[in-house]
């Protein structure tokens, strides 16, 4: 596998993951009452607890995307 192929792979991984992150964030922002009601019923959690879990998930996912997709892609951009 050459650097060009790896660079393209990381680019498309980054695009897909950032798209999923954006889509998830938009869904959570627009459907928050319904999500809180549904998860509150399933897991017996308060609305505050559900909000904390959702925002922790989005934050963790963002960090993972940056560390494993964005930074390696930028490093390969600098190398070539």
Image: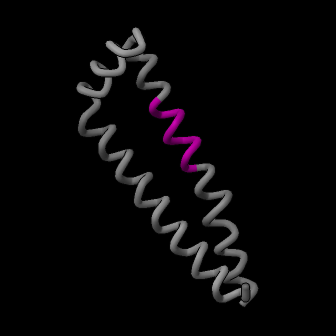
Which residue occupies 42% across, 25% down? Answer: 51
Q: Is residue 30 above or below residue 66?
A: above
Can you give x and y, in whole percent of width and height, for residue 71 in the image? Answer: 67, 66
The boundaries of the magenta stretch are: 54-62
In this view, the residue farthest toward the front is 1
Can you give x and y, in whole percent of width and height, for residue 30 in the image? Answer: 24, 39
Q: How is the image coloured?
A: one colour
Location of residue 59 (image quadrant): top right
Question: Magenta includes 2?
Answer: no
Q: Main secondary structure of the magenta part?
A: helix
Which residue occupies 75% across, 85% down? Answer: 79
Which residue occupies 55% across, 50% down? Answer: 62
Name the quarter where the C terminus is drawn. Answer: bottom right
Q: Is residue 15 above or below residue 31?
A: below
Give the side of residue 45 with respect to residue 2, left or right: left
Q: Is residue 58 above or below residue 38?
A: below
Location of residue 10 (image quadrant): bottom right
Give the side of residue 7 with respect to residue 39, left or right: right
Give the side of residue 61 with respect to residue 54, left or right: right
Q: How many marks?
A: 0
In this view, the residue farthest toward the right is 79
Can you give x and y, in whole percent of width and height, for residue 33 in the image? Answer: 25, 25
Question: Magenta includes 55?
Answer: yes
Can you give x and y, in whole percent of width and height, for residue 20 in the image? Answer: 42, 55
Location of residue 66 (image quadrant): bottom right
User: In this view of the protein, which residue sits in the foreground, 43 or 45?
Assistant: 43
Name the quarter where the N terminus is drawn. Answer: bottom right
């Amino acid at each position: 596998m050459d650097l060009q192929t790896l660079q393209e792979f990381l680019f498309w991984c980054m695009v897909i993951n950032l798209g999923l992150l954006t889509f998830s964030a938009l869904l959570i922002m627009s459907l928050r009452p319904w999500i809180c009601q549904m998860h509150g019923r399933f897991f017996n959690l308060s609305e505050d607890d559900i909000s904390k879990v959702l925002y922790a998930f989005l934050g963790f996912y963002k960090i993972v995307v940056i560390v494993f997709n964005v930074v390696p892609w930028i490093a390969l951009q600098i190398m070539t």
